Amino acid sequence: MIQKFQYFKPSLGQSWLLVALMIVGSILAAVVMPHAPQSLQYFVMMMIPVVFCWWQGDNAQFAGERPLPINAPHFGKLHPVLFFLLAGIAMLALNVVVEPTTSFIPMPDFAKKVFEQAFLDSPLWDVILSTCILAPLLEEFLCRGMMLRGMLPQKGARKAILWSAFLFAFMHLNPWQSIPAFLIGLFMGWVYWRTHCLWATIFMHFLNNAVSVITSRIWTDLPVDASLMDILPPTQYWITYAGCVVVAAVSLYILYEKTLPAKVSSPVDA
């Protein structure tokens, strides 16, 4: 059953359709189960595009399409453990580097209410399940495992990564998150292109979201749109920021030098 997904290779238009189905799912979940745990609402929201992918994959397999694996890890000269360590360090550092971009667009009031409900008002188990488990698994499956994988052989790496990052930013439906989500999406798309490892982007997504959950639970007196600059004194913040720039640059350089684009860029027999 799971193998059917690899027969569906979404085009750009079909990727936009997946985002539209996700939006329909969010509306449906809010209307049908307004008082349900956010993790259940999120699961319902994401299942609509996931089921659509399975259905399209079933049709493509029946039509004789060749599959394109969703996960076929290739880490070049790096040991998998070292690769995951470097990718995780790069993600945490980049999370700090891109954080100032949230100041470009003020957080809308509706987004503040959503974030307060998601991170502060909901039980911790619900926040962890929805934000740290379901979101990395399902969003990476759709954005990298389906959309990016489908567009890579059709549009080439550069356009496919750009479009998948844009769709990833758009699907958050929050302009305040759009720029950092786009930049982080570029990095995760690049990693998927280099390694064809979906678990790598899931891991990085988990780290990114876990940091948000931890900081929101530790500094509960700060507004939901607070940044690291609001937590650290100015001198300490800029020292930390400069250090993260260096760490991110070094980690990215090593990843670039030691890995090669995965050869799984066109339909192959799995």
Image (spheres, helix red, strand yellow):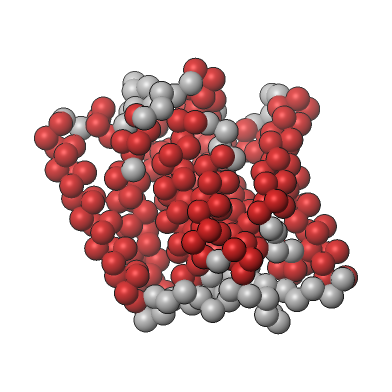
Q: Position of residue 29 (x, y in %)?
A: 73, 32
Q: Residue furthest left?
A: 235
Q: Is residue 118 above or below residue 259?
A: above
> Which residue is drawn at the image coordinates 64% and 32% (left, top)?
37
> Which residue is drawn at the image coordinates 29% and 63% (left, top)?
251
When asked about the image quadrant of residue 84, the answer is: bottom left
Locate residue 268 relative to residue 184 in the image: left or right: right
Q: Is residue 147 above or below residue 41?
A: below
Image quadrant occupied by the N terminus: bottom right
| The one of 82 and 122 positioned closer to us in this rendering | 82
Q: Position of residue 24 (x, y in %)?
A: 74, 35
> Which residue is drawn at the image coordinates 47% and 51% (left, top)?
185
Q: Position of residue 128 (x, y in %)?
A: 52, 41
Q: Is residue 237 above or below residue 225?
A: below
Locate residue 169 relative to residue 70 in the image: left or right: left
| The one of 59 and 220 positioned closer to us in this rendering | 59
Label total for image: 0
Q: Residue furthest right?
A: 62
Q: Is residue 29 visible?
A: no
When asked about the image quadrant of residue 3, the answer is: bottom right
> Which residue is drawn at the image coordinates 80% and 59% (left, top)?
56
Image quadrant occupied by the C terminus: bottom right
Q: Is residue 169 visible?
A: yes
Q: Is residue 22 above or below residue 202?
A: above
When asked about the image quadrant of residue 19, the answer is: top right
Locate residue 227 relative to residue 62 in the image: left or right: left
